[in-house]
Image (cartoon, rainbow, N blue to C red):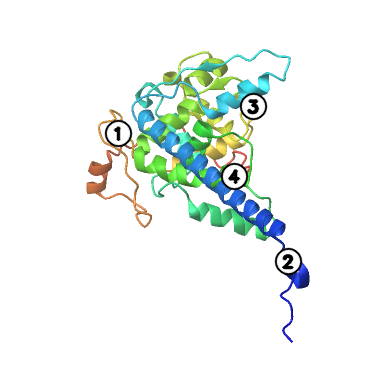
Amino acid sequence: MTAPPPRPGAYGQPSPQQSSWTTVVRTGCRKGIAVIVATIATYLGICVLALVLYAAIFPPITGVQLQRRVEALFNENPYRTTYCPRPLRALDADLPRAVVAAEDRRFFRHSGIDWTAVGDAIEEYRRGGDLRGASSISQQLVKNLFLTTHRSIIRKGLEVPLTYAAELVLSKRRILELYVNIIEWGPGIYGAEAAAQHHYEHSARRLTRNQAAALTACIPNPRERRPSTVGGYKYVILRRMHNLGPFPLSPLGALPFRTVPENNSAFSLEAHAAYGTIHVPSKAAASASYVNRAR
C-alpha cells in the first residue's frame, strides 16, 4: 500500500508560507547589499572626481569642517571659521618640512599607506604599549577632505581606496600642499595661513623654524594644543627636521613629486634633478640638552 505524500509543513518540509517568507528575506538582503555597494561606489566616485578638481583648486569646504559645523549646532558658542588656503610657495619652507618630519617621515617613499609604520604600531601594541596612530599624510588628507574625525572601521575602510586614489590623481607636492592648507589647527582654524595669523599674528611666509615646529606639534590634537604649550615635542620635531636630509620639494613647483623607491636611502645626482630636490639649510639644530619626549 503506497504511503500518502507528506503534507506541507510536516516532517520538516517547509510550508508555502515559510518558503515565500524565505524568498522575501533573501531578495530583501540581496537588494539591501546591492544598494549599500552602489551607495559606497557612488560616494567613492564623487570623491575621486573631487580629487581631480582639487589637483587644480583648493576645496571650498571639507568633511571635517562640515562635521564641526554640525557639532556647533548643539553648542551654545557661535561657530566661526578661518580658512585661508595658500600655495606652498607662499609658506615658509620649514613648515612642510616640519610636517613631513613629524607626521610621515616616509612620505616620499610610500605609495599612500606606510605599511611599515602600521606594522610597527601593531607590534608595539602587542608588546603592551599604547595603540598609536600610524596614518600617513595621504590618509589624513582624505580623512579631512571626505570623512570625519570619528574613529570607526567604516571610516578606515573608506580611507584605504581614497588614499590610493589620491596618490594616483595628485602629485606628492599637491598632497602636501592640500594637507597643510585644510587641516584643523585650532577651533575654527583651518590651514597654515590661518594658524600663523591666529597664533603669531603674521603670515605663514614669515614663520621661523621654531614656530613651524611648534605649530606642527599641535597637529595631533589641534583643538587642545597650543604652540606655547607643546613642550618638548617641539624639540623632537626640530631634531627630526635636522635629520630629515634633502627635501624633494621644488620651490617653483615646476617639477611634480613622485614616490621615491623604498630602498633609496639617499638621492643620487640624477635623482636630485628628477625630483627637483632642494636642501633646506637648518636655521637651528636642536641640542642634546632638549627634552626628548616621545609622542
Residue 133 shown left or right of residue 86 in the figure = right
Q: Position of residue 152 (x, y in %)?
A: 63, 43
Question: Which mark identifies residue 154?
Answer: 4
Q: Position of residue 105 (x, y in %)?
A: 46, 45
Query: Which residue ends up furthest to the front in the rendered image?
Result: 1
Residue 233 shown left or right of residue 250 in the figure = right
Looking at the picture, tell me which residue is in the foreground, 182 or 70.
70
Give amino acid for label 4. Answer: Ile
Whether residues under marks 3 and 2 lie with C-beta atoms below 8 angstroms apart, the answer is: no
Where the C terminus falls, by quadrant?
A: top right
Where the N terminus falls, by quadrant?
A: bottom right
Residue at image mark 2: 8
Residue 285 visible in image: no
Give the Cα separation between the discs numbered 4 and 2.
Answer: 44 Å
Of badges 1 and 4, nearer the viewer stands 4
- Disc 3 is placed on an element classified as loop
Looking at the picture, tell me which residue is in the foreground, 26 or 79.
26
Of badges 4 and 3, nearer the viewer stands 4
Q: Position of residue 269 (x, y in %)?
A: 23, 47
